[in-house]
Image: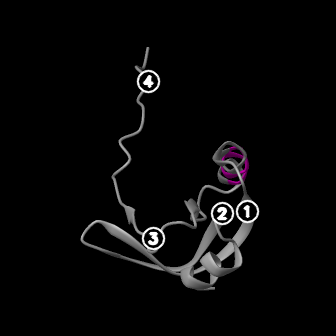
Amino acid sequence: MKWEQVREQYPEQWVLVEAISAHSENAIRYIDELSVISNFPDSTFAWKKYKKLHLADPSREYYIFHTDHEEIEVKEQNFMGVRRRLQ
């Protein structure tokens, strides 16, 4: 599904989506095709569902967007992680 279709089908909603097809360019992740997992009137519930899904399978690309946005893009950042001191 394209973003334009998602916006039409879920107006003024928060949507939890999975990227089916995406590419990176100049540290920006562009999502070409996506699948809507759920829609929410409130971002709090969207984040709870996102955390649950991401914990179960962190290799999948899940995102939360509001359909008021005409275009979607995600700024890529390198994950630094947290290191524990070895004793």
- List the residue tagged with mark 3: 72
Where is residue 60? Give x, y as percent.
Answer: 61, 64
User: Mark 2 belongs to which amino acid?
Assistant: Val
Which numbered mark, 4 or 2, is in the foreground of this view? Answer: 2
Q: Which residue is mark 2?
A: 15
Residue with the mark numbered 4: 84
Question: Which of the marked residues, 1 or 2, is nearer the chain's N terminus?
Answer: 2
Eyeballing the image, is 3 above or below 45?
A: below
Would you say the magenta stretch is mainly helix, strand or loop? Answer: helix
Q: Which residue, as the protein is rendered here, is positioned at the far left?
A: 26
* Marks 4, 3: nearer the viewer: 3
Kindly report the distance in space between the C-alpha atoms of the residues bearing marks 4 and 3.
Answer: 35 Å
Measure the C-alpha gap from mark 1 to mark 2: 4 Å
Residue contact at pointers 1 and 2, CB within 8 angstroms: yes
Tell me where residue 62 sits by quadrant.
Answer: bottom right
Task: Look at the image and say whether residue 49 sits in the magenta stretch.
Answer: yes
Which of the 4 quarters of the picture holds residue 38? Answer: bottom right
> Which of the colour schemes (rainbow, by chain, secondary structure, one colour) is used?
one colour
Q: Could you tell me the amino acid type at mark 4?
A: Arg
Q: Position of residue 23 (x, y in %)?
A: 41, 79
| Rendered residue at 67%/51% (across/down) | 50
- Residue drawn at x 61%, y 55% as measured from the top left: 58
User: Could you say whether the residue bearing mark 4 is in a helix, strand or loop?
Assistant: loop
Point out the stretch of residues depicted in magenta.
Answer: 48-53
Q: Earlier in the sequence, mark 3 or mark 2?
A: 2
